[in-house]
Structure formats: structure tokens, C-alpha cells
Amino acid sequence: SQQGEEDPQALSIQEGENATMNCSYKTSINNLQWYRQNSGRGLVHLILIRSNEREKHSGRLRVTLDTSKKSSSLLITASRAADTASYFCATVRGGSEKLVFGKGTKLTVNP
Amino acid sequence: EPEVTQTPSHQVTQMGQEVILRCVPISNHLYFYWYRQILGQKVEFLVSFYNNEISEKSEIFDDQFSVERPDGSNFTLKIRSTKLEDSAMYFCASQGGTGGRGNTIYFGEGSWLTVV
């Protein structure tokens, strides 16, 4: 698999439930960023977590990072229909500037 | 919240024509980027720009592409002699310079380019 691979590829849940999306990567990283994209729209930044951090919170979002397993997770609690979107993780390697994106998880929150 | 703005939001062009996509990055940012997303595919890095020069580019960013920061606010991507496979959403992004790299990268809403 390539750097920044998310799973599942698609996730459908009911409003009020929690949604967990996972991301794996292959090389060492400087930081990992999660983005949301509504269909046909731009990328909205959610959270940045650095390689020396293990967990970060922002509102209903919780991101974890396990550098030993080269994986991250994004948890959205108490989901809403408005959370329906594609979610991408993107990594930045040390010595590079570019974000390397995964294919994303398409989240559908049913009202 | 400050934002990256891009124009046009959508452009249709004939194969072989030149296209210029424009971006206004966040005003105090120092690092600028172009990415693209072909419909249904991953977001792909094209190029990064810092201190008035390209600092990193991907294999996609060949001689057909060029970037410029013509003044203190705009950042442009030029695609010469467009091909059908250049049809994609092109995203501009920027990053603040305090503390160097490794900060949040903010994206614009994108410019849809359709080559016919």
C-alpha cells in the first residue's frame, strides 16, 4: 500500500453514532494532517498531529498517532448529517514539504 | 479565518491551449503549493514554492507546467498546451513560515479544469 492509506474506504453510520477512520503509512513522518472534503469542494483542514504527539482533540474530533505502528485514527463523536464527506489523512516526511494523501474514507451519516 | 482564494472556480479549455490558474495565498504565509485531484482519485502534489523559487516538485510537474509569484500576493500555475489528461481539480495551498515547515497547510476551494 502507499503512504497515507485510509480504511475503511467507505463508512455509513446513523446520526449520533461515532465514526472511526484509520490511516496507515510506510515511512517516518514529520507530521500527519487530516482533511475533510465535501463532494467537489476544497480540502478543509481538521487537525495536525506531530510525530512526537500521541493524541489531539478538536471539538468532536480526536486524532491519535502511533508512530511505532505507523498509523493514525480519526474519531468523530456524536456524528451529524453535516459530517458526511470524504476524510483524508496526509503525511509530511522529514526533509520534504509535500503532503502525501491517501485515497480517503467516504463517510455517510444518515439522519 | 484567513483563507486561500482561487480563480477561476471552473474553466473549460480546448486541448493545446494555455491555461493560467490563479491563487491568493494567506497573506503572511511563506510556502506555497499546487496540488491536483483527478476525478475520483487521490490528491497529488505538483510543486512547492518558497523564497521565489521552486523548492520541490513531483514527476507530474514537467516542462508543461510553470509557477510564478508575479507580485506580493498572487501565485499562479501555468499549463502550456493542455492535454485531455490535465482535466482535474487544481488546488492551491499555503503554509505559514513561523517555525519553518511542518505547520498546517491550508487549501483553497480549487479550480476545476476541463480540457476538451
Image (cartoon, coloured by chain):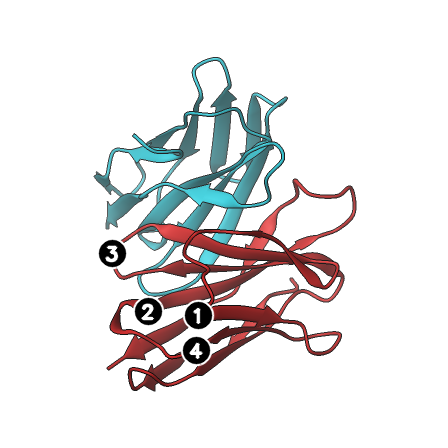
Chain colours: A cyan, B red
Amino acid type of the residue that numbered disc 3 sits on in the rendered structure? Gly
Quadrant that contains the C terminus of chain B: bottom left
Chain identity of mark 3: B
Q: Earlier in the sequence, mark 4 or mark 2?
A: 4
Binning the other alpha carbons within 10 Å of mark 2 as few (below 14), some (14 to 19) or many (20 upward) gives some
Q: CA distance from mark 4 to mark 1?
A: 5 Å
Binning the other alpha carbons within 10 Å of mark 3 as few (below 14), some (14 to 19) or many (20 upward) gives few
> Looking at the image, do the residues carrying marks 4 and 1 touch, with CB atoms under 8 Å apart?
yes
Evaluate whether label 4 is on the same chain as label 1.
Answer: yes
Farthest right residue in view = B98
Binning the other alpha carbons within 10 Å of mark 1 as few (below 14), some (14 to 19) or many (20 upward) gives few
> Looking at the image, do the residues carrying marks 4 and 2 touch, with CB atoms under 8 Å apart?
no
Q: What residue did someone put label 3 on?
A: B40
Question: Horizontal and vertical percent for residue A25?
Answer: 41, 28
Q: What residue did someone put label 1 on?
A: B64
Q: What residue did someone put label 2 on?
A: B86
